[in-house]
Amino acid sequence: MKILMVCLGNICRSPLAEGIMKTKLPEDYMVDSAGTISMHEGEHPDKRAIKTAANHGIDISKQRSRPIGAKDFEIFDKIYCMDVDVLADVVSKAENEEQRQKISLFLEAAGDHKNTEVPDPYWGDMKDFENVFQLLDKGCDKIAENLLLES
Ligand code: 4NP
């Protein structure tokens, strides 16, 4: 099973989602992340994302930002998008129905009834990053549980 987490810049939300999800699944599950824009390509995650993950014992400092590409729709089984704009963008890049079936909104897949989007913390502060971490942590618990039940 191969899982891709996607946000806009691949420096805040999806690197956190990747780091958290890796702690929830067995090692034979591949977890990666990407962005819909290439603006930060090659960069490590935002310092605040690295610090927030480290506060919870997770090291995301070695990740590098990359944009989502056509191959990702072939390689990955599940593609989780952090917000509705990202979802629309990712859906528009899919080439057929089989690929579109792989895509979902992260919090919808997690069955979160209160929130539909993981808010972009980029223009916020450490409190916003911690809030994102909590949303992702709960969401990853639920998604991992469902994936393990499916397998
Ligand atoms: P992310 O956050 O999508 O969670 O990685 C952002 C990162 C960069 C920008 C916006 C959001 N940006 O405008 O550069």
Image (cartoon, helix red, strand yellow):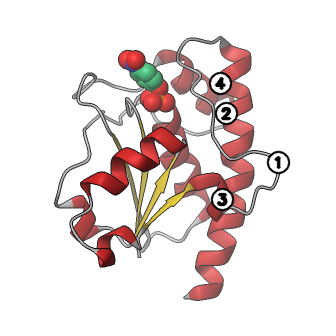
**Residue at image x 31%, y 76%?**
97
Residue 13 higher or lower than 98, as above or below: above
Mark 3: is the Cβ under 8 angstroms from ligand 1?
no
Rounded to the nearest angstrom, the CA distance separating label 2 from label 3 is 15 Å
- x and y, in percent, of residue 67 in the image: 25, 39
Residue 114's disc number: 1
Name the front one of labels 2 and 3. Answer: 3
For numbered disc 3, what is the local secondary structure?
Answer: helix
Q: For residue 143, which quarter of the picture?
A: bottom right
Rounded to the nearest angstrom, the CA distance separating label 2 from label 1 is 14 Å
The residue nearer to you, when weighing 70 against 136, is 70
Residue 108's disc number: 3
- The residue pinned by badge 4 equals 129
The residue nearer to you, when weighing 24 against 84, is 84
Q: Crowdedness of circle 4 by 10 Å Cα count: few (<14), some, many (20+)? A: many
Residue 79 higher or lower than 47, as above or below: below
Mark 2: is the Cβ under 8 angstroms from ligand 1?
yes
